[in-house]
Image (cartoon, rainbow, N blue to C red):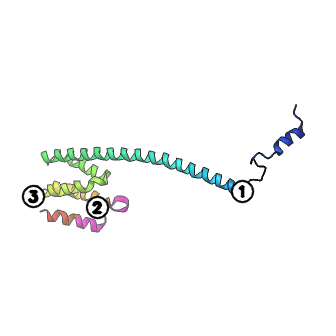
């Protein structure tokens, strides 16, 4: 059994520095600082690699959405009277603001091509609200935006 004085003598020995001189407190701070820099760098690398993976997934999803929008527009060109396709395009414009402006331009051209068909005007109005609302807090267009949409539609007649 180890006696208590022997234990005290083991812990009382200076083991921090080989020359038996006391360690400068600044050296300890530098060691801790270096350790923190390494940890922060590792965290940065891990978070950076995760965000790059998320960005790649978002890009793929965006490309898929654009392909879907283009196929809906092709269907609409083939059959402009199909209300179901118009409703899908309005839904896409409301849910995906990045696509709203291009769908709005398509709707305005459809108004022009159909010589002011009331269904196309309503379609352009709905998509226009989504397009203008995408730039507003809450996604709702202002009264000035509503007037701009009416002006856009009227200019295509």
* Nearest to N terminus: mark 2 or mark 1: 1
Comparing marks 2 and 3, which lies closer to the viewer? 2
Residue 103's x, y, as percent?
22, 53
Give the distance between the C-alpha atoms of the residues marked 3 and 1, in whole angstroms.
84 Å
* Nearest to N terminus: mark 2 or mark 3: 3
Q: Is residue 24 shown above or below 78?
A: below
Q: Main secondary structure of the magenta part?
A: helix
Label 3 sits on a secondary structure element that is loop
Q: Residue at x 78, y 52 (%)?
A: 21
Give the distance between the C-alpha atoms of the residues marked 2 and 3, in whole angstroms.
23 Å
Q: What residue span does the magenta drawing correspond to?
A: 135-148
Residue 136's x, y, as percent?
34, 62
Please, which residue is most extreme toward the top here?
A: 1
Q: Residues within 10 Å of mark 3 (few under 14, many from 20)?
A: few
Q: Residues within 10 Å of mark 2 (few under 14, many from 20)?
A: many
Res 71 quadrant in image: top left
Q: Is residue 66 shown above or below 117?
A: above
Comparing marks 2 and 1, which lies closer to the viewer? 1
The dot on residue 25 is 1
* Along the viewing direction, whichever of 128 and 42 lies nearer the viewer: 42
Q: Which residue is mark 2?
A: 132
Q: Which residue is mark 3?
A: 115
- Whether the magenta-drawn stretch holds residue 106 is answered as no
The dot on residue 7 is none
* Nearest to N terminus: mark 3 or mark 1: 1
Q: Is residue 113 left or right of residue 58?
A: left
Res 6 quadrant in image: top right
């Amino acid at each position: 059994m180890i006696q208590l004085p022997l234990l005290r003598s083991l812990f009382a020995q200076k083991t921090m520095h080989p020359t038996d001189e006391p360690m400068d407190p600044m050296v300890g701070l530098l060691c801790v600082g270096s350790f923190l820099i390494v940890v922060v760098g590792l965290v940065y690398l891990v978070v950076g690699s995760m965000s790059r993976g998320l960005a790649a997934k978002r890009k793929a999803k965006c490309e898929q959405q654009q392909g879907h929008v283009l196929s809906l527009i092709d269907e609409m060109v083939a059959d402009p009277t199909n209300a179901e396709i118009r409703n899908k395009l309005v839904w896409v414009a409301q849910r995906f603001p990045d696509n709203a402006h291009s769908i709005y331009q398509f709707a305005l051209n459809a108004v022009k091509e159909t010589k002011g068909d009331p269904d196309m005007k309503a379609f352009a109005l709905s998509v226009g609200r989504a397009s203008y609302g995408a730039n507003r807090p809450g996604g709702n267009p202002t009264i000035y935006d509503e007037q701009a949409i009416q002006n856009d539609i009227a200019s295509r007649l």
